[in-house]
Image: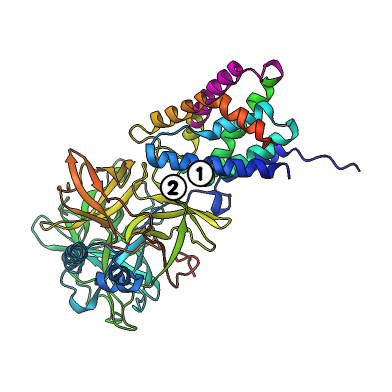
Amino acid sequence: MPVRRVNLGLVVLGLALLSLTPAAPSFLRRPELVAVHAYRPLDLLRREIGEAEAEEEGLGFAPELAARIEAGLSRWDELLLGDAGADGVVARIVAIDRVRRRLLVDAGEGIRLAPGDAVTAGRFALGVVDRAEGGLAVVDMPWTPDARFAGSAEDASGAEVRLILAGLDRHEWTASVSHPERLSALRVDGDVRVPVVDDLLPESVPRLPPGLVLGSLRVDELLRKTGTEAFRVVPTLDVRGLDAVCVRTAGASAGGWSAGFERREVSALACGLASPGRDGLVLTGLGLPDGAAVTWGGMFFGSIEAAAFGAARVRGVFDPGQDRCVVVLSARRSGPIVVRTLRAWRGGGRLRVGSEQTRPEVGDLVVTSGRGEHVPRGLFIGAVVRVDGETIDVLRGEVSPSAPVEVLRRRGLPDDPWRDD
Amino acid sequence: MAYVPFAVACAVLFYLQALAVDVTAVAPDLGPLLAVHLGLFARRERVAGAVGLLGLLRGAVGAEPIGAVVLTHLALAYLVLTLRDVLFADRVVTQWVVAFLGGAVFLVLRLVIGLVVPLGGEEGAGGLARLAVSTLLATAIAPLLFALLRTLRVGP
């Protein structure tokens, strides 16, 4: 049988089309950047990733800047920890499973989180650890389909009514209310809090700290159309705009805290990207992991989005079209916000702050929230130099071409942290 | 082996382009220009392989998904290839016109693909305008680049 010549054009076309589908190998696809981070004394992290050495060599950024970042993050961490005290550790939110509505959190290497640990943020209860591997844990929330949580709401007379929340598989994050002790006269729009359930559950069953807010009570309009009186609970705190959580665990000091990031100096092409208006870099080297954080001169430059054939493409932090959770640090108030990158230029970029987000002020510092498996929290992104309505200009400053380019990678990550055993 | 000199030439050109973008923010985009060159002058049976190589190199130093880059360059090169028998490709005016129209078609292709696959970034303020300027800016140097590549005999 004669062998027909392969039509190379069709092969290239097929490969190009394949690369645009979810079935494509990862190095041909643009990985989704979901994620967030959390934490601990920043100087420990810096020491770990080698910034202390860089400072000694005069390559790092100013110590006063590092001190401002440290102080700002510590203030914010205190708010996150709330009344948890020594039982609480701050864990960065690595990623959010938007379909299953679960969180992947990372408390650092050496911490031993355990199933049943309560996850909170200030006065809010967010969920419980479903499974954990070292400092990494998957957290179920009341909005996770099939998850069950106990809650309590007030009725019109102010009396407590206990109920059961069950995550619903709807478009929005919500939980149904079932088995209330009294269905009538529940106060809509009131807080749903964690109840005391000592009379219902044995002490061995893990539970959330009582009194923390789980969400807000609403009438279930969807079921009301069918003539059924029903209620649902919606989140009061949107975790998508949160950088870290507090995990109340007994394993806080099991192995000593360590962020667990390893660093590696790499070579970069002495140019940016060939695409106009984009912020990025091409690195050379073998074994560069997708999603790894890239720093240049100690400052956060971006994340590796595609690595193959001994080279990797880095998407810059200011590259337009990204929705990013960043932490804004100021003397007045520190906390995370979600921004959209609009424009990149040399040493900085323009960001749009969401209409419901707190507006930063000129002089505020912007640092990484730690979202992403390999992105530490608290790396310097830039300083706010201009605020105009919803848009802010952030300046990173010029980086010396001789400054070291480094790739950071979280040690000991499982292949698929979300995997159900 | 016919592809090696071409690959080296592309790598050097894209590196120079990246340097220029770093300095000026807008520089001629040589990707579509090289695709037009292949469509006009490459041996017919080598166009697909050369464009695949071109797309991989351009994708490696660009910000867009490599598949989208290969697809747009492939479509552009084959469009020129189907027309080249009725063109006087050696004339400078023809090269200018084909490069200009090729750049315009390239932009349309990018827009269409961008509707299906998020290319990222170009919806940002001025992003599309910058892309258009850099693509059409390349038209100006089309005859010069084509002559250089043909003189050096690096085309496949």
Disc 1 to disc 2: CB gap under 8 Å: yes
Residue B61 x, y percent position in the rendering: 50, 45
Q: Residue at x 15, y 47 (%)?
A: A362
Residue A281 x, y percent position in the rendering: 43, 50
The way the protein has been coloured in the rendering is: rainbow
Q: How far apart are marks 1 and 2 (CA)?
A: 8 Å
> Which one is nearer the viewer's eye here, A195 or A324?
A324
Helix, strand or loop at mark 2:
loop
Amino acid type shown at disc 1: Tyr
Q: Is residue B102 magenta?
A: yes
Amino acid type shown at disc 2: Cys
Determine which quarter of the picture holds residue B124.
top left
Mainly helix, strand or loop, the magenta region? helix
The reply to whether residue A20 is in sight is no
Q: Residue at x 53, y 34 (%)?
A: B30
The label on residue A171 is: none
The label on residue B15 is: 1
Q: Does the magenta stretch include residue B148?
A: no
| For residue A8, side relative to residue B149 (left or right) | right
| For residue A221, side relative to residue B148 (left or right) | left
> Which one is nearer the viewer's eye here, A393 or A113?
A393
Residue reaching furthest to the right: A1
Helix, strand or loop at mark 1:
helix
Q: Which residue does the numbered mark 2 point to in the structure image? A: A271
| For residue A350, side relative to residue A264 (left or right) | left
The stretch of residues the image draws in magenta is B85-110
Circle 2 packing at 10 Å, graded few (<14), some (14-19), many (20+), is many
Residue reaching furthest to the front: B151
